[in-house]
Image: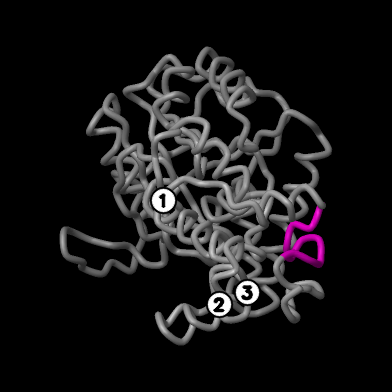
């Protein structure tokens, strides 16, 4: 372990502040595969945490690599502008990241976080490839929000060294990370990954490989139930959302939230679950959701869904 000054005692040992060390539970060299919406945030958080000597940021195509790099640089620049990070620390964090389109650069990393699009065929090809490239000790972690960790673990050829780490958007702000184990995950691998999540400043929760893990398993069926109420004309969009806000203390109603997430994302998750778990009554596809997505009205991102939108500002129900 590399130590610095400013030691403060915590419950089970010592925490070093500011964090500029490699902890016993963390990994010296980390790879991030995919620099899109989630991947660039994971890469940034890993770099600014200070617990890694280097981060390898990999994209198969240069345009996606450049886009992710720009996102990271702009996000860190904002932190400096808002006096949430010094210019020196920002430079140090950015210098930890190596950007590449060469998958062989992942060969000696200790831990890989995969954050490519939710396409199982694509992930299969990726894991079969990096399973051959990375050293045998490398742990693989998928940031999937809805796909089976066990299936991807089998693709990798190292199921005992495979876990899920489901971050939430925006990664830089949201504290929760679901850490998912399969029946074949080595307990030491799981414990090390769980510790890594804490080390980079997030709050880990433990979950088995159940569809949707904790948050989406509870949330997505609830959104679907609200949409089914719309299908049945039980209540209006406005009244459903106001009821959950004022009656259950939710910051926004389920249909507002579905619009914010993206109706295409909600449909993608539900269709995958219905296909794979046809006997699960909680998994259903509301007619109104399918109609909206087929019409290209996906919520906030297209300016119209259950509500009208102007950028991130929600208007009246459609």
The type of colouring in the image is one colour
Q: Quadrant of residue 288?
A: bottom right
Q: Taking the image as drawn, is residue 30 in sight?
A: no
Q: Position of residue 104 (x, y in %)?
A: 62, 20
Q: Taking the image as drawn, is residue 298 in sight?
A: yes
Label 1, label 3: how far apart the Cα atoms are: 22 Å
Question: Does residue 71 lie above or below 253 as drawn?
Answer: above
**Mark identifier at residue 237:** 3
Q: Are marks 2 and 3 in contact (CB under 8 Å)?
A: yes
Can you tell which of label 1 and label 2 is closer to the viewer?
2
Q: Position of residue 272 (x, y in %)?
A: 55, 36
Label 2, label 3: how far apart the Cα atoms are: 6 Å
Q: Does the magenta segment cover residue 254?
A: no
**Mark identifier at residue 241:** 2
Question: Which residue occupies the foreground of this view, 313 or 108?
Answer: 313
Q: Position of residue 62 (x, y in %)?
A: 81, 34
In the rendered structure, the answer to whether residue 186 lies left or right of residue 229 reads: left
Residue at the image point whose x is 26% and y is 69% from the top: 8
Q: Earlier in the sequence, mark 1 or mark 3?
A: 1
Query: Callout 3: helix, strand or loop?
Result: helix
């Amino acid at each position: 372990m590399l130590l610095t000054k400013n030691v403060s005692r915590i419950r089970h040992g010592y925490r070093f502040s500011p964090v500029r060390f490699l902890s016993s539970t963390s990994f010296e060299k980390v790879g991030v595969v995919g620099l899109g919406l989630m991947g660039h945030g994971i890469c940034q958080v890993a770099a600014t945490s200070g617990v890694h000597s280097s981060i390898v940021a990999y994209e198969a195509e240069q345009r996606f690599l450049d886009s992710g790099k720009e996102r990271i640089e702009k996000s860190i620049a904002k932190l400096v502008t808002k006096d949430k990070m010094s210019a020196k620390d920002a430079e140090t964090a950015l210098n930890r990241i190596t950007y590449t389109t060469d998958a062989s650069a992942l060969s000696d990393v200790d831990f890989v976080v995969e954050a490519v699009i939710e396409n199982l065929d694509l992930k299969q090809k990726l894991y079969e490839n990096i399973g051959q490239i990375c050293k045998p000790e490398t742990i693989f972690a998928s940031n999937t929000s809805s796909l089976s960790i066990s299936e991807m673990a089998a693709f990798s050829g190292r199921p005992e060294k495979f876990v899920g780490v489901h971050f939430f958007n925006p990664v830089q702000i949201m504290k929760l990370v679901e850490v998912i184990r399969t029946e074949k995950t080595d307990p030491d691998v799981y414990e090390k990954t769980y510790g890594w999540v804490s080390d980079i400043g997030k709050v880990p929760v433990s979950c088995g490989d159940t569809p949707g893990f904790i948050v989406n398993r509870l949330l997505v069926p609830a959104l679907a139930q609200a949409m089914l109420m719309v299908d049945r004309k039980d209540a209006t969009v406005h009244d459903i959302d106001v009821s959950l806000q004022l009656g259950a203390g939710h910051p926004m109603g389920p249909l507002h939230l579905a619009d914010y997430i993206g109706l295409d994302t909600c449909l993608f998750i539900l269709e995958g679950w219905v296909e794979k778990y046809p006997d699960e009554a909680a998994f259903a596809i509301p007619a109104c959701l399918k109609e909206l997505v087929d019409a290209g009205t996906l919520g906030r991102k297209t300016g119209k869904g259950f509500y009208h939108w102007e950028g991130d500002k929600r208007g009246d129900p459609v």
